[in-house]
Amino acid sequence: MHALKIKDPEEVAEVKADSKNRISLGRKVKLVARHYRVLQERSSGRIILEPLAVIPISEHWLAHSPKAKASVERGLADAKAGRLVDAPEDFSKYVDPE
């Protein structure tokens, strides 16, 4: 794992762990994500919360395939620009009605 560099640290609150080693961040901490990786610096014991972007496993392949990701991005840009074509058939027949 790479060394983290903290660019602009700001002390937001002082907290205390409870009897089960849980720490409540309180309302003063403004979270930027719902999922975090917890890192602990071995030498100092410093705890770092690194925000994560979580994607479904079914979409994992896309994030790790530059060629596929570029193709999807081109398709989205085409759609946004109105460059659309009619489908050769009606695909609604393949949708399961719930």
Image (tube, rainbow, N blue to C red):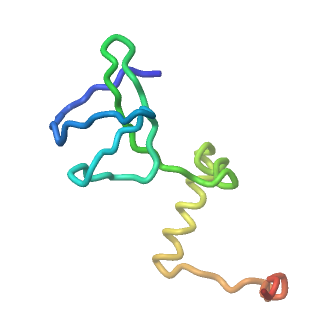
Residue with the most extreme top position? 43
Which of the 4 image quadrants contains residue 98? bottom right
**Residue at position x 45%, y 34% from top?**
20
How many circles with numbers are drawn on the protein? 0
Residue 98 relative to residue 22: left or right? right
Residue 12 relative to residue 19: left or right? left
Give residue 30's position: percent from left, percent from top.
26, 53
Give residue 23's position: percent from left, percent from top.
35, 39
Quick one: 51 or 30, which is closer to the camera? 30
Q: Is residue 43 above or below residue 22?
A: above
Which of the 4 image quadrants contains residue 13? top left
Which of the 4 image quadrants contains residue 92? bottom right
Give residue 6's position: percent from left, percent from top.
24, 29
**Residue at position x 80%, y 88% from top?**
97
Quick one: 63 or 67, which is closer to the camera? 63
Q: Is residue 70 above or below residue 51?
A: below
Give residue 83's position: percent from left, percent from top.
54, 79
Residue 34 relative to residue 30: left or right? right
Residue with the most extreme front position? 19
Residue 92 relative to residue 83: left or right? right
**Residue at position x 25%, y 49% from top?**
29
Quick one: 98 or 42, which is closer to the camera? 42
Q: Is residue 96 above or below residue 11?
A: below
